[in-house]
Amino acid sequence: MPADLIAPVPPAWRKAGGPAKTEDFVARGDVNESALKVCTAQVDGTRKWNGEP
């Protein structure tokens, strides 16, 4: 299995005390969306590598 397909997914956004202002919600959404894209690419790549449709 190629290493980039099993690499750890980036961690979810965290801030002590949680989001406090609008910018925090935007940052959290951006970070979590990026992590989801990495995870999706890994799953899709693994399926392709495994010969699945």
Image (cartoon, helix red, strand yellow):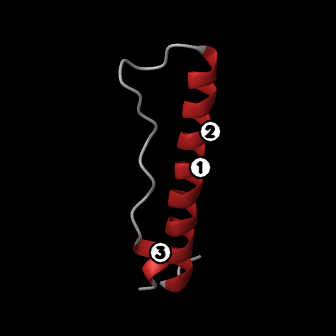
Where does label 2 land, which residue?
A: 30
Residue 49 location (% of width, % of height) = 52, 84
Q: Which label number is shown at residue 22?
A: none
- In the image, residue 10 above or below residue 1: above
Query: Which residue does the image show at 62% across and 39% down from the upper left?
Result: 30
Choose mark 2 or mark 3, whichever is in front: 2
Where is residue 1 shown, x and y percent of the image? 41, 86
Q: Residue at x 56, y 24 (%)?
A: 24
Position of residue 40 in the picture relative to residue 7 (left or right): right
Q: Which mark is residue 34?
A: 1
**How far, Cα to Cα, is label 3 from label 1?**
15 Å
C-alpha distance separating marks 2 and 3: 22 Å
Residue at coordinates 50% horizontally, 66% vertically from top-left? 43
Visible in this render: residue 32? yes
Q: Where 44 falls versus 51 (above or below)? A: above
Within 10 angstroms of label 3, few (less than 14), some, or many (20 or more) residues? some
- Asked if labels 1 and 2 touch by Cβ distance under 8 angstroms, the answer is yes
> What residue is pinned by disc 3?
5
Amino acid type, residue under disc 2 in the picture: Asp
Who comes first in sequence, dot 3 or dot 1?
3
Q: Residue at x 63, y 22 (%)?
A: 23
- Residue type at tag 1: Ser
Looking at the rendered structure, the secondary structure element under dot 3 is helix
Q: Residues within 10 Å of mark 1 (few under 14, many from 20)?
A: some
Q: CA distance from mark 2 to mark 1?
A: 6 Å
Question: Mark 2 falls on what kind of element?
Answer: helix
Front: mark 3 or 1? 1
Question: Residue 36: where, in percent of width, then height?
Answer: 54, 50
